[in-house]
Amino acid sequence: MAANLEASREPFSLVIVGHVDHGKSTVIGRLLADTHSLPEGKLEQVRLQCERNARPFEYAFLLDALKAEQAQGITIDAARCFFKTAKRDVLVNDAPGHIEFLKNMVTGAARAEAALLVIDAKEGIRENSKRHGFLMSLLGIGSLAVLVNKMDLVGWSQQAFEAIRAEYLAFLKPLGVQPVAFIPVSALGGDNLASRSAAAPWYQGPTVLEQVDAFERPRGRESLAFRMPVQDIYKFTEEGDDRRIVAGTIEAGSVQVGEEVAFYPSGKRSVVASIEAFAAPPRLSIGVGEAAGFTLSTQIYIKPGELMARAGDPAPRVGRRFRATVFWMGRAPLVAGRSYKLKLAAARVAVRLVEVRKVLDAAATGELEAAKRQVDRHDVAEVVLEAVRPLAYNLHSEHFATGRFVLVDQFDIAGCGIILEQMDGQDSLAAGHVKSREAAWDRGLVDAAARAARFKHRGKLVLLAGLDGAGNQALAKRLEQALFALGCNSYYLGLGNLEQGLDANQGAATLSQAEQVDRLGELARLMTDAGLLLVTALPGLDDADLEALQALQSPHELFTICVGESPFSRVRPSLLLPAGLSPAEALDRALKGLAQGEVLTDYSI
């Protein structure tokens, strides 16, 4: 019978948060002691250590194992321990409450299924009481109970308890956070933790242990729509194996061999041909939490960072601009005009701040203020962000795993957030930039038609953008040479020149794809306006890159040449050359394509 009861127990992850010195570690230490979950002799060892150091014993010392923590009297890192309730084996994190260690608190809370938030009955609601309450929602922790601690210091006053309860509920309501319980406790005396206290006959709710057992588990990710962020694409060439294996870890749902899948934001589709695993037998289905590799019936070109979904499931949202709630931890404020890296699942994309809607002033009134123009350190804010390229995501309310993100400033994780609303449909920052640039463009007295008549060709960016990077570069150089021999004003722009020239900082890291596109687009606008045939090769481009490039060099057009398989789905290349052509034949067809496209105005085919 005992063995059956033990087998029926379930693991449960819990985090305890709250303002510094409000008693989180004491709550956990008392729970460990009262549930007999401490190692044998640990309690006596800590008591003896306190006597030797002439310090009063505190249950918090059971958790504060680091000497630095005991010396400073604050919990710096998230301590992890275990205790047992009537039906659960609880893994509990004591997250730091000091404002300087909010990053550690987020780390400790990220995988919790429920939370206990501790408020000092005498000191009342403080800054981090508010921040931590909001962060529980930010991290997707819907099960929250508030422990009003140190009730003995206010004489177990029901009025004091109800005042804190009413004030905190009023604060949490506009944030969409609804605690499941408020429990009056005294962690030092063990009141209402493991057993009910006679000091508060007016309280009829659960004890802390009873509430831990009553917490509802979050909805399982296995019941959600299938989502797998694509981490990489592998190709093995030995023994004629030309398959591409799409790899990643499944965040939600499941998929089977033979089911049609779609990839976002590209929108490309195929059918799962096989599920691959190293040194494992073949499988017909796979589900949430598992690392997976898939081969597809149709070999399609996709990039790491795409989101794989089952074609029959609701599709993720695809867009550039969205409204989000952000918790900012960076030393420098979040400001408009700067570029930040957003990480969502496997996607990595540059974003900019469009608008600060309102900021949670937790240190003062706790209200949402709309006057701020930036997000300062430790602020919680509602903002509008825009990515430089389309991003596949879900609203946080729809799909937790693909609705939250982190923001990186330089090389530091500076913020985290959740997506609340899609906001595409307005002019993008890039479109606004092009519009203002063209409105202010200072034009000379020589127009494009006069330049075309002089040079015998129109100004044009000729882009080699197929999958074969090395082959594209070689063809681009031969094309520049052939055009020059025909008397054209042609110039080959190497990728390295983009990275090391212009406004590149000395010693700067390699440019991202988006940065390469931005620089090439702005440079092409100048050079094609001067009537040049600018020839370049840029591998790894997709539809979004090509659309951005066309917009940036507007009003001049783009001539795109692809050799072999085209990587694009929405955009049709200007010229598609078959694979396997000799260098001479590829060059000849490229020249003819430019003539047929009316780029070369005086060329005989």
Image (cartoon, helix red, strand yellow):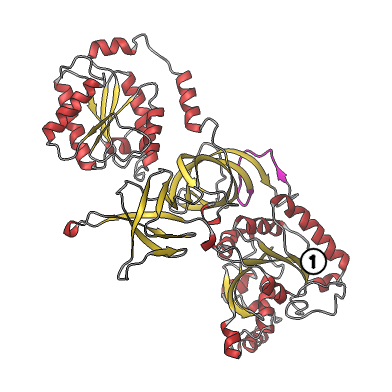
| 399 to the left or right of 516 | right
Question: In percent of the image, x 72 and y 49: which residue is there?
Answer: 174
Q: Quadrant of residue 87?
A: bottom right
Question: In percent of the image, x 51 and y 63: which residue is there?
Answer: 222
Q: Dot 1: few (<14), some (14–19), or many (≥20) neighbours within 10 Å?
A: many
Verify whether residue 370 appears in magenta: yes
Verify whether residue 253 appears in magenta: no
**360 is higher (above) or lower (below) than 524:** below
Q: Main secondary structure of the magenta part?
A: loop
Instruction: Residue 409: give x, y in percent of width and height.
Output: 49, 48
Residue placed most toward the observer, 562 or 363:
562
Q: Quadrant of the C terminus?
A: top left
Q: Quadrant of the N terminus?
A: bottom right
Instruction: Residue 302: give x, y in percent of width and height.
Output: 35, 47
| Label 1 SS | loop
Q: Amino acid at mark 1?
A: Ala
Q: Which residue is mark 1?
A: 121
| 337 to the left or right of 256 | right
Residue 524 visible at all: yes
- Magenta region, residue range: 368-380
Question: In percent of the image, x 13 and y 35: which residue is there?
Answer: 583
For the view shown, which residue lies furthest in the front direction?
A: 258
Question: In percent of the image, x 18 and y 59: which residue is there?
Answer: 238
**521 is higher (above) or lower (below) than 242:** above
Q: Quadrant of residue 3?
A: bottom right
Instruction: Residue 426: give x, y in percent of width and height.
Output: 55, 31
Instruction: Residue 81: give x, y in percent of width and height.
Output: 58, 77
